[in-house]
Each structure stands twice: as structure tokens, then as C-alpha cells.
Amino acid sequence: MGGHEGTPLIINLAPTGMVPTKEMTPHVPVSPEEILEDVAACRELGVSIVHLHARDDDGTPTHRKEAFAPLVEGVREIDPELIVCVTCSGRNVPEVEARSEVLELDGAAKPDMASLTLGSNNFRRQASVNSPETIMALAERMRDAGVIPELEAFEPGMVLTGRLLMERGLVSESSFINILLGNPGTSPLAPSVLAAFISLLPAGWIWSLAGIGRYQLDANALAIPAGGHVRVGLEDNIWLDRDRTRLATNVDLVERVVKMAELCERPIATPAQAREILGTRARVAQVKAA
Ligand code: ZN
């Protein structure tokens, strides 16, 4: 794994997700205004990627592109350099058509990246089903749309599916992959488990770590000195402390990452540096022209 060698840390903010509701925490941003307010505040702290989910007016997760457009456009107004990643999750909807609708957005509403889960897995109350055919179809649509996949792996074996996509020319040799640990039904958070994922990654891939629920803090603390990047936010974890006495805000969670990076003497990537690392530099000119 090595150390971080001074590589700037990419902080990927996942502010909303599909699960948290206002009943669970008043801090989860759900409307476009709330989401953009959190994005702006967290941008000031050092976030360089935003991983967005859209909700309908009643708070239900939606794949409608009309719901994503104001989010993506709003982020562009906050900072055109910020990298926008949209979800193509199949947690509520398995159909490729619905999940990839957001890839049709164009101009300032066009996302830079989209999430691509590399297999099927169980969450506590629900299965997330991604058949080989679906993964392939989503990867093809992302390639055709010029949107970079944000790969997601819940088990080390899912990395092999990512390798297969690379061999078929569907994802790049310098892909960005989110490793998600601590979900009750899949890989637990442990250094040995993380090492298993990393041992399977192609040499040029860039990894980021996410911890589900109480493991978010541990995941942050594991990734920062090891040279990985971090995903953080209320999508994965709504509590600030282990004993679940204090509900977190997105700002709280990002501030904690920034503090840890300081302790590890690791600089925080600006959005421009993150684009350099991920190879999405060219997009900015398109965004500014749109
Ligand atoms: Zn997500």
C-alpha cells in the first residue's frame, strides 16, 4: 500500500443517497436547494467530487433526468471545476433504461461521472441487483455519453468485473474505484480486507474508501495515510459518534476528514487537482462554454 507520499486527497461528498429521510435526520439535504447549500459549504472545506442522488418532491429517490438537471447545473454555478458524479444505482429500480436516463443530460447539466456498481449484493433490508448484462449495458452507455464511471465494489471479486470492462475497452486504465466496507451483508472494514481489494486492482487505478454507518470514521482513518481517497457524507452514515447520540451534518463529516488529513500531513486536492488526477480536465472548458 505504501504511504500517501503527499498525493492530494480527493474528498468525494455523498450528501443524500437513497435511504436517509427527514424522519431519520433533519440534516439530510433532500431538495435541490438543500443539496446545493451543503455542496457549497463542503466545497469551501475541500470537497472536489460530489456524488448526487435526486429525490422527488415527497422525498422518494428518483432516476428522472429532470430531477438531476437542476442539481448538476446548480453545482456548476457553485464551481465549474467541481466534479459531478450522478448515481445510476439499481437499488430501487433494476432496469437499465431508467437508471441511465441521467446520462442523456447535456450542456451544463451533463455530469462528469456516474456510479457503476460492479456486482450484486445485499444491504440490510434490500438486495441491489446488477446482472452482468446490466453492468455491461450501463458501461456502454457511459462510454457513449462520454461520462466517466465511478466504479463501486462491495466485494474484492467485483474488482474482477471491473478488469473485464477494462479489457473490453469500456473503462479506462486509470479508473476511479470506490471500495465500500462495513455494510452488514458484504465485506467488513478491516485492513486485511482492504488489502485484498487493493491487491486485485490494476496498477493505474485510483482507489477511494467508503465506510458504511459507524465504519465511516474508520474508513476515513484507514484511507488517508495509505494513499487512498475518501468518500464521506450522510448517504453512508448519519451519526457523528459511535454511540449514536449526535446526528451529523455533511459539514461535520467533511470537517472531520480535513482534520485527519492535516494530522497525516496530507494536502487536500482542489477540484482542479482532482480533475488532473482523474483525467477529467477537458470537461471544464465544455462546462464553461455550455
Ligand atoms: Zn450513491
Image (tube, rainbow, N blue to C red):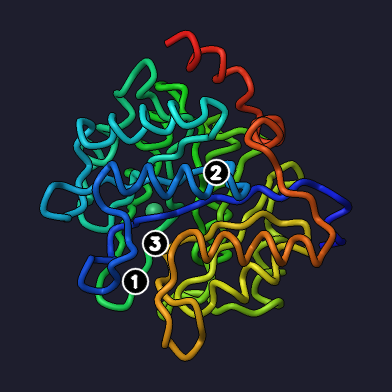
Of the pair 272 and 44, the residue shown nearer to us: 44
Query: Position of 116 compared to 263: left or right?
Result: left
Question: Could you give the CA–CA distance between mark 2 and mark 1, rounded to whole angstroms?
Answer: 32 Å
Please indicate whether residue 165 sits to the left or right of residue 183 in the image: right
Earlier along the polypeptide chain: callout 2 or callout 3?
A: 2
**Ligand 1: which quarter?**
bottom left
The residue sitting at 53% across, 39% down in the picture is 165
Q: In the rendered structure, which amino acid carries the disc numbered 1? A: Asn
Q: Are marks 1 and 3 in contact (CB under 8 Å)?
A: no
Q: Which mark is residue 43?
A: 2
Q: Looking at the image, is 124 positioned above or below residue 255? A: below
Mark 3 neighbour density, 10 Å: few (under 14) some (14–19) many (20 or more): many
Farthest left residue in view: 58
Examine the rendering and report whether any part of residue 71 can be seen. yes
Name the mark on residue 235: 3
Quick one: which residue is furthest to the bottom in this view? 243
Q: Residue at x 52, y 29 (%)?
A: 79
In which quadrant is the N terminus drawn?
bottom right
Residue density around tag 2, few if under 14, some if 14–19, many if 20 or more, within 10 Å: many
Q: Are marks 2 and 1 in contact (CB under 8 Å)?
A: no
Tell me the kind of residue under disc 2.
Arg
**Residue at 54% from the left image edge and 42% from the top image edge:** 49
Determine which residue is flagged by label 1: 122
For discs 1 and 3, the disc positioned in front in the rendered view: 3
Give the x, y percent position of residue 12.
55, 50
Q: Secondary structure at mark 1?
A: strand
Marks 2, 1: nearer the viewer: 2
Picture residue at 32% right of the left edge, 48% below the top: 53
- Please say if 218 is above or below 93: below
